[in-house]
Amino acid sequence: MAGRFPQRPARTTVRGGQVAVPAGVPRQAPAPARVRTWTPDGPLDLGLVLGPLRRGPGDPTFRATPDGAVWRTALTPAGPGTLRVTARGAEVRGEAWGPGAEWLLEQLPDMLGAADDPSVFVPRHRVVAQARHRRPGLRLTRTGLVMESLIPSVLEQKVTTDEAYRAWRLLVRAYGEPAPGPAPERMCVMPHPRTWALIPSWEWHRAGVDDKRASTVLRAVRVAARMEEAVRMPPAEAQARLELVPGIGPWTSAEVVQRSHGAADAVTVGDVHLPGIVGFALAGDRDADDAVMLELLEPYAGQRHRAARLILLSGRVPARRHPKMPRVDIGRRVTAGRAHRHPAPG
């Protein structure tokens, strides 16, 4: 979900945030394998809609370029693919490469919010109404893919934003494959589930991923096909399917279905920042917990995720009061432990 802190963004602010997509006349990429144009039935802000798919500014699977294009890679049911999306006037153009090109273009409208209906949302608070008025192009993406959101969400469990994004960046670049087509430099497609399963333990540690999160990813990729089946279920049932994997709880499952399903009501619980932000914006209560947050969002039943995103985008957030969660360098700690057990001769 997303909004902007006046201070340095935390994970909550980036999840549904806006990616800066520079204005201008988009250049045409050379010789695309497949092309599709689509006209949305209302305002569409590419940065807002696709922003939740970016895992940090260095995400190898996502790039916004100065010509106004958004690039993304995906491991689709048909294979790896690269997608370039541009908006010109009311029309959106998608260009795709690789074995997954056809699949990506078929999913293009849903990815840009065609399955979402913002008109059913009724603001109940001034701050929400104002945010909606300022951001008419907000729609909820629906990727139709589970694992590409599940793995980075597991990496984000109980660590700082920087740690999670670094882990995703390092692992995808090391074990993914180069993006098909004329993608920007260093873009990659996320690894196949089997490849994730073969990553050595020390490589997880070097990426800063502790054994608990690594084990959760490994359990998930072993049943990747069952996880992907969840995209055809209603969001609540999909969350229940995901939570059958030990280490995946309500926080992670909500983060996934928000992206894979475009789930308008999948509010994130268990987050460090979100309850205080919602509580502060709607009731002046910066100490709100999950129970208070859910009570405040009750008037938006069926649309609680959208309401939370609009609150985050409103900018009405409490000033930082506590120090940032300390970063733990797993790789350095493991290396130091080995050195302690095997001291150099002397």
Image (cartoon, rainbow, N blue to C red):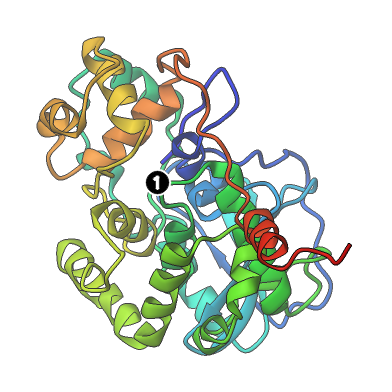
Query: How many labels were placed on the picture?
Result: 1
Question: The C terminus is located in which quarter?
Answer: bottom right
Examine the image and state in which quarter residue 84 appears: bottom right
Q: Is residue 203 left or right of residue 39?
A: right
Q: Secondary structure at mark 1?
A: loop
- Report if residue 324 is visible in the image: yes
User: Which residue is situated farthest in the top direction here?
Assistant: 284
Which residue is disc 1 drawn over?
A: 139
Residue drawn at 47 percent across, 52 percent down: 156
Q: Is residue 171 left or right of residue 326?
A: right
Residue drawn at 60 percent across, 52 percent down: 165
User: Which residue is situated farthest in the front direction here?
Assistant: 346
Q: Position of residue 326 (x, y in %)?
A: 55, 35
Residue drawn at 24 percent across, 50 percent down: 266
Tell which of 123 and 38 is nearer to you. Answer: 123
Q: Is residue 49 above or below residue 257?
A: above
Examine the image and state in which quarter residue 141 appears: bottom left
- Report if residue 146 is visible in the image: no
Q: Is residue 199 left or right of residue 118?
A: right
Tag 1: amino acid: Arg
Q: Is residue 291 above or below residue 317?
A: below
Badge 1 density bin: few <14, some 14–19, many ≥20, Cα 10 Å: many
Residue drawn at 63 percent across, 61 percent down: 334
Tell which of 306 and 40 is nearer to you. Answer: 306
Q: Position of residue 139 (x, y in %)?
A: 40, 46
Tell which of 59 and 299 is nearer to you. Answer: 59
User: Which residue is situated farthest in the right direction here?
Assistant: 346
Question: The N terminus is located in which quarter?
Answer: top left
Q: Is residue 292 above or below residue 50?
A: above
Q: Is residue 194 left or right of residue 33?
A: left
Q: Position of residue 49 (x, y in %)?
A: 48, 48
Q: Position of residue 179 (x, y in %)?
A: 72, 76
